[in-house]
Amino acid sequence: MIGDDQKFKTEQGNKIMIEGIDADKITAWFENAVPELKAPLTFSLIAGGHSNLTFRCTDASGRDFVLRRPPLGHVLESAHDVAREHRIVSALQNSGIPVPTTIGVCTDIEVNGAPFYVMDHVDGLVLHDSVVGQEVAETERRTLGLHVMDVLSNLHKINPDDVGLGELGRKEAYLARQLKRWNKQWVATKTHPVPEMEESAKLLEERMPDQVGATIVHGDYRLGNMIVESGEIQAVLDWELCTLGDPLADVGYLLNNWVSPEEVDAMEGDSAPTAVGGYPSRDELCDIYATNTGRDLSEINYYRAFSHWRLAAIGQGVYKRYLVGAMGEDRDMDLEKYKESVTNRAAQALALLTA
């Protein structure tokens, strides 16, 4: 995980101020939550997040923690619920799914202006793109790819009731609920017309497959939301979109992000960590998942289309938050490029549905 010390940083006298962090109050909270803490704490924004803000917190002994809080400013109702995310990660501590160890959650907005939760820092690489992807040894890429699908299979084999997450959300009608949710987000954050979004939504409604079973669904399962080392996942991150429902939604999403070297000219393909090569193919991943879970993947292209469409709706929300300054000042963000990526995602969804 790479700290970006310039983002969100200002100076007030001799004191460094970090947007989104009340250092004194958070340090006091830490001292109650972590008795062995060695104050003072230093804070830096961790690069890579467009949603909940993620900060590294380092005490005087050099121990690192990670703090997650919602974006600055107004966000959509029910979005960015860090207390819920803390509950999910805590529930999975002893499930066999690699997640960071949670430290605690603070819902008192008097402490930092918004809820936050804290977990231990996990060492390793976060494969945000093909540049970082080059740092994974060629001899480890295939092993890592197999582990990615094994972990997803294991997540989908967990009975949510067994880990205390049976009430996390409704188990039935996952796709219908997701279409309703992200249509609502699209309407709430729409800033320009994208006809492919409306047409894709219509076809997704008409062609919706029957849901077979219900599992814990991560909602954003990809290499960019994992810490990896030595060809294995050390921790799965960013559980804010997690719910209960159709597990094939996770599979379709992962496949869309699993770009081969031959696809680097596709939309954003050159930035995918798998674009460096050496990873199992999509077909191999599907075979592994089907063998591990016994699930039928014959309708997987529907789920891939749904994933592109949903990601377009999510991306539109991110675009608007940057547009109105809710992600802080002077963020390194090409707004026009991001706006174009929303349209491209919607177009990819429509292409899969009309092929």
Image (cartoon, rainbow, N blue to C red):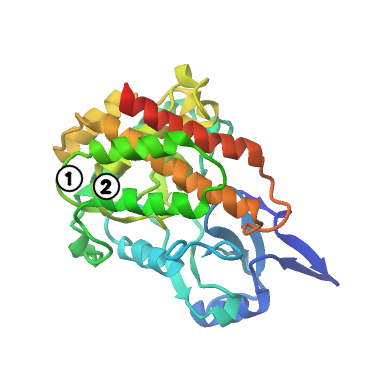
Which of these two is toward me, 51 or 325?
Answer: 325
Res 95 → quadrant: bottom left
Give the residue type that dot 2 points to: Leu
Which of these two is toward me, 332 or 152?
Answer: 332
Please tell me which residue is depicted at 45% across the width and 49% down the height of the picture.
186
Please tell me which residue is depicted at 16% across the width and 34% down the height of the picture.
296
- Density class for disc 2 (Cα within 10 Å; few <14, some 14-19, many ≥20) is many
Query: Residue beneath label 1, please?
Result: 211
In the rendered structure, are the residues bearing label 1 and label 2 in contact, judged by CB atoms less than 8 Å apart? yes
Task: Look at the numbered disc 1 and give the secondary structure of its residue.
Answer: loop
First-in-chain label (1 vs 2)? 2
Residue 45 in picture, x, y percent from top left? 64, 57
Q: Residue furthest top?
A: 262
- Density class for disc 1 (Cα within 10 Å; few <14, some 14-19, many ≥20) is some
Give the residue type that dot 1 points to: Gln
Which of these two is toward me, 206 or 162?
Answer: 206
320 to 337, vertically: above or below: below
Residue 176 in picture, x, y percent from top left? 26, 49
Query: Residue beneath label 2, please?
Result: 175
Residue 311 in picture, x, y percent from top left? 44, 42
Residue 98 in picture, x, y percent from top left? 36, 52
**Residue 174 visible at all:** yes
**Residue 229 visible at all:** no
Q: Quadrant of the C terminus?
A: top left
39 to 4, vertically: above or below: below
Q: Residue furthest right?
A: 13
Please tell me which residue is depicted at 59% across the width and 39% down the height of the picture.
338
Which of these two is toward me, 338 or 6?
Answer: 338
